[in-house]
């Protein structure tokens, strides 16, 4: 059976990581039997990031896109009926969510002084109290240096909100056309975009960004619709 190496749940969400939540959607959609293996330590995973899967043969595959390719190799079709142009469009949407909106999540959780104490407690509560502050502050500093180099870290919170708003607007425009991003059925783009939106909504302190998504019925109903379409009823979700 496939094991999904994942960060633990966050509230009622599958994981505090949207990429781990995406991997869970891919696995359920693929129909392969799998189980979760929770860890807070990504250091031994490929690329030192989670999610990763351990296949039945013992191969470890890191990165949600590589997990998608592996599952496609086993026969999963995450985009049934889509044309090549629709698939290209879908890929661009996924990149918008994972390579732009995601970094807004990172900054909202790690970059705001009023959120940081709550995030630190949630992410690092397993560390001995004496080590918790120095280790977590060191990680925070290195993450913020990365965000500065990436560029998004140089915008003010208000500028970031305005930038993210344009992505949220694009997603909303698509959802006026149908229940899912690519139309009538759930596809790969939804399995990437919905977990990122959910991560925004689930930021543990009520930031303007979190409230923006949490207060938008089109987006929140969409997140829940995708999860339900793939995972089934809510109760099954955390125990997979
Ligand atoms: N491109 C990767 C991104 C995975 C990722 O960014 N994981 C984060 C958590 S959301 C992580 O493990 N970060 C640990 C670190 O950077 O030290 C994917 O699609 O799986």
Image (cartoon, grey):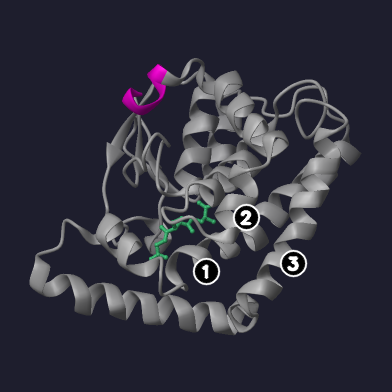
Q: In the drawing, does residue 236 fall left or right of residue 131?
A: right
Tell me if mark 2 has few (under 14), some (14-19) or many (20+) residues whose alpha carbon lies within 10 angstroms of its own. Answer: some
Label whose residue precedes the other's in the sequence (3 or 1): 1
Which label lies toward us, 1 or 2? Answer: 1
Circles 2 and 3, Cβ within 8 Å, touching? The answer is: no
Q: Earlier in the sequence, mark 1 or mark 2?
A: 2
Cβ of mark 2 under 8 Å from ligand 1: the answer is yes
**What predominant SS class does the magenta segment belong to?**
helix
Q: Which residues are magenta?
A: 235-240
Instruction: Point out residue 128 in the picture as x, y percentages from the top left corner.
Output: 9, 65
Classify the position of the C terminus by image quarter.
top left
- Mark nearer the viewer, 2 or 3: 3
Q: Earlier in the sequence, mark 2 or mark 3?
A: 2
Would residue 227 appear left or right of 159 to someone viewing this image? left
Position of the N terminus by quadrant:
top left
Q: Residue 39's spot in the image, x, y percent?
A: 26, 48
Circle 1 sits on which residue? 107
Q: Residue at x 70, y 48 (%)?
A: 94
Q: Which residue is mark 2?
A: 98
Task: Please indicate, yes or no, whether residue 102 appears anywhere in the rendered image.
Answer: no
Compared to 239, does 53 lie above or below?
below
Residue 74 falls in image quadrant: top right
Q: Which residue is mark 3?
A: 163
Q: Using the numbered discs, state the Cα–Cα distance from disc 2 to disc 3 in whole angstroms.
A: 15 Å
Q: At x 51% / y 16%, what residue is drawn? A: 232
The image shows residue 215, relative to residue 33, as above or below, that is below
Of helix, strand and loop, which one carries label 1? helix
Question: Separation of disc 3 and disc 1 at Cα?
Answer: 13 Å
Element class at badge 3:
helix
Task: Name the mark on residue 7.
Answer: none
**Is 237 within the magenta?**
yes
């Amino acid at each position: 059976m496939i094991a999904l190496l994942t960060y633990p749940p966050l509230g009622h969400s599958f994981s505090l990581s949207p990429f781990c939540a995406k991997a869970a959607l891919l696995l359920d959609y693929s129909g392969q039997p799998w189980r979760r293996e929770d860890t807070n330590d990504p250091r031994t995973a490929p690329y030192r990031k989670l999610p990763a899967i351990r296949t039945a043969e013992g191969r470890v595959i890191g990165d949600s896109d590589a997990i998608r390719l592996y599952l496609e190799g086993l026969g999963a079709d995450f985009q049934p009926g889509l044309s090549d142009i629709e698939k290209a469009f879908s890929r661009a949407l996924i990149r918008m969510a994972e390579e732009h909106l995601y970094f807004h999540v990172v900054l909202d959780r790690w970059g705001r002084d009023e959120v940081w104490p709550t995030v630190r407690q949630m992410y690092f509560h397993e560390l001995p109290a004496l080590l918790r502050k120095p280790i977590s502050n060191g990680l925070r500093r290195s993450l913020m240096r990365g965000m500065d180099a990436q560029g998004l870290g140089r915008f003010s919170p208000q500028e970031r909100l305005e930038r993210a708003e344009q992505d949220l607007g694009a997603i909303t425009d698509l959802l006026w056309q149908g229940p899912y991003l690519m139309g009538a059925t759930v596809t790969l783009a939804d399995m990437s975009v919905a977990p990122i939106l959910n991560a925004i909504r689930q930021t543990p302190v009520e930031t303007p960004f979190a409230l923006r998504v949490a207060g938008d019925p089109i987006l929140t109903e969409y997140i829940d619709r995708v999860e339900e379409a793939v995972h089934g009823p809510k109760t099954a979700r955390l125990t997979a």
